Image (spheres, rainbow, N blue to C red):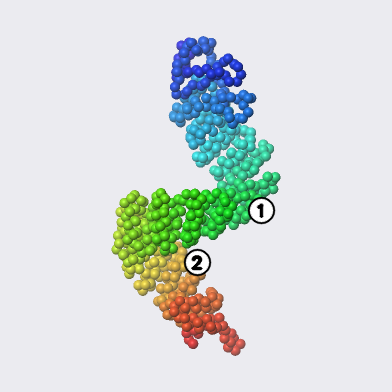
Amino acid sequence: MRKTLTKFLSSFPPVPRHCVPYINGGSRFPRYTPPGAAKLDPIPHSRSNPRWLFTNSLPPPEWVQPFTDVSDLVTDPKHLQPSPWVHQILTLLDNSPNMEQTLDAYCRKFLIKLPPNFVTFVLRSDQLRQQFDLAFRFFCWAGKQKGYDHNIECYVCLIDILSVSDDLNRIRGLFGEFKDRGLLMNISAVNSLIRNFGSLGMVEELLWVWRKMKENDIEPSLYTYNFLMDGLVNSSFIESAEQVFEVIESGRVGPDVVTYNTMIKGYCKSGKTQKAMEKFREMEVRNVEPDKITYLTLMQACYSEGDFSSCLSLYQEMEEKELEIPPHAYSLVISGLCKDGKPLEAYVVYENMIRRSCKPNVAIFTALIDSYAKCGKMEEALRIFMIMKNGGFEPDEVTYGVIINGLCRSGRLEEAMEYFEFCKGNNVAVNAVFYSSLIDGLGKAGRVDEAEKLFEEMVENGCTRDSYCYNALIDALAKNGKIDEAIILFKRMEDEGCDQTVYTYTILISGLFKEHRNEEALKLWDLMINKGITPTAASFRALSNGLCLSGKVARACKILDELAPMGIVLETAFEDMISVLCKAGRIEQACKLADGVVDRGREIPGRVRTVLINALRKAGNADLAMKLMHSKIGIGYDRMGSVKRRVKFRVLVES
């Protein structure tokens, strides 16, 4: 027996024993400090208990607690010191293949077992917070201890850890086991489960917890309601969230800023920004002060819908209330103003941002540079670029792409090429935007050969050619009289699997009409319609202008009529046709077209008359415009006996 027990003990690393006076009372017995998991010294035979060595069985394992002192003298549980056993167990959790066997051996050696509150404490440790598999393995190992059953806190804590990993299958399996156990719910567990299931969009599980809470007569707090609402909103159950909001409103406590923020988020998420704004204004009536989350959520929704003025108003309201403005809010306002073509106002917001010690980012600088460049203020754009670089911000490929595009728009092609070569030589990712900007700029400058060279260079440099690059070169070829080469490139575009856009067809139709190849242009229009590509006002303008200038006004009107059953209504089509005829000096045809529009009831006479006056004025026919304006032509009536007839527009050129 002695040999057997000695052999059993020698299979573990030796254990040092440190005697420390027992702190609770005057006991003469020493407190035992657990040994390290890695380095254990031999047990001296003189210190071993001879009664244990020579008996047939070991004493039963002891359930160890996660805290050192659990006496009644401790008044604040937050100040409890973790037991040394916690550190030793955490040391053994190394996620190795033999981790479970190591834990078993350690617990057998020191005759300990880990109770549920110990397991929960370990699961809540920082070490396991991001270690999803490790936490799950420890949970499973603990559940196999003899005489052990997980409590509700163990399940809730592990679900909380796994929710970060988005491992829905594992969470569902764990929750299924939890339901089978029939554990009694408490408010803390309810709040945690509803929060996690809500964030994961697990609505069935969320509602099961809610029903159980009601069955267990647990009174939900405002926090519980807020977690429930957040879960419903995250799962796009906006109407259900509204019902919960109404319940909160009718309660004793009433909604707080979190409740409103959740409801506003739900409305914004479902595209009901107007209802979100109504809820926002309701907060003032209920004396609930909005916070930065409220404003940021609304600003994001307004920005997404292109409502940049509302975005700016919300920002100004934050400033008036002296709320902390997050960097993303500044980014939304500045980007919105830049997209709205207001770089000066955007720069004022940028200065306010700097004044408040809020650090800008590369995206904000890029938006400012792009806006100034598109407004034709290239020098100001380059000044912002230098401020950015001097401030320690490294421009990325988007920033350089904006600079090159702006320089090409301004006709400063040599500078654009210099930036392009700099990017290639300094490991800046050169993408299709660089090439399409340069190809377009070179094409507009008549340097078609250089544009073609860059187009071919793209593939050599591993850059995929997109529709923008193809369109830029096709446009350059068409405008420089190389329509046949443009058509070849158009066919090549299809062969290489690049989408032919409505802009592609518009370029070629316009080019073919300029070369008086009308039938080919019409065939291309039919091909576009047959491919299901929806015409735009610009594409029909290219077609109608070509037909009108070819004397085929009726054909243009017929094609316009064919678009109506397809749900395509081009409101400015007749206006464009009248304008091009007047500009070409074909006043008689313009008047006949105006009469046809009115006679068919497509437009009211007064509107057509205004269009014709403006078209004549812009075409340099001020005399005819004045004559039309001061007469009853188009809108007046002549009486012939008992019949009233509208004075036709063609009277303008016949008189």
Against 186, residue 561 (above or below) is below
Task: Tell me where residue 303 appears, x and y as whole percent.
Answer: 52, 56
**SS at circle 2:** loop
Residue 472: image quadrant is: bottom left
Identity, as a three-letter code, of the amino acid under mark 2: Ile
Asked whether the viewer can see residue 289, the reply is yes
- Left or right position of 300 against 209: left
Residue at position x 42%, y 71% in the image: 543
Task: Tell me where residue 19 appears, x and y as whole percent.
Answer: 52, 17
Residue under pointer 1: 285
Identity, as a three-letter code, of the amino acid under mark 1: Val
Q: Earlier in the sequence, mark 2 or mark 1?
A: 1
Residue at position x 60%, y 46% in the image: 258
Task: Tell me where residue 15 appears, x and y as whole percent.
Answer: 47, 18
Q: Which mark is residue 86?
A: none
**SS at circle 1:** helix
Against 317, residue 204 (above or below) is above
Few, some or many residues within 10 Å of mark 2 (<14, 14–19, 20+): some
Against 246, residue 503 (above or below) is below
Asked whether the viewer can see residue 494, the reply is no
Residue under pointer 2: 568
Along the line of sight, the residue nearer the viewer: 28 or 177: 28
Few, some or many residues within 10 Å of mark 1 (<14, 14–19, 20+): few
Along the line of sight, the residue nearer the viewer: 400 or 139: 400
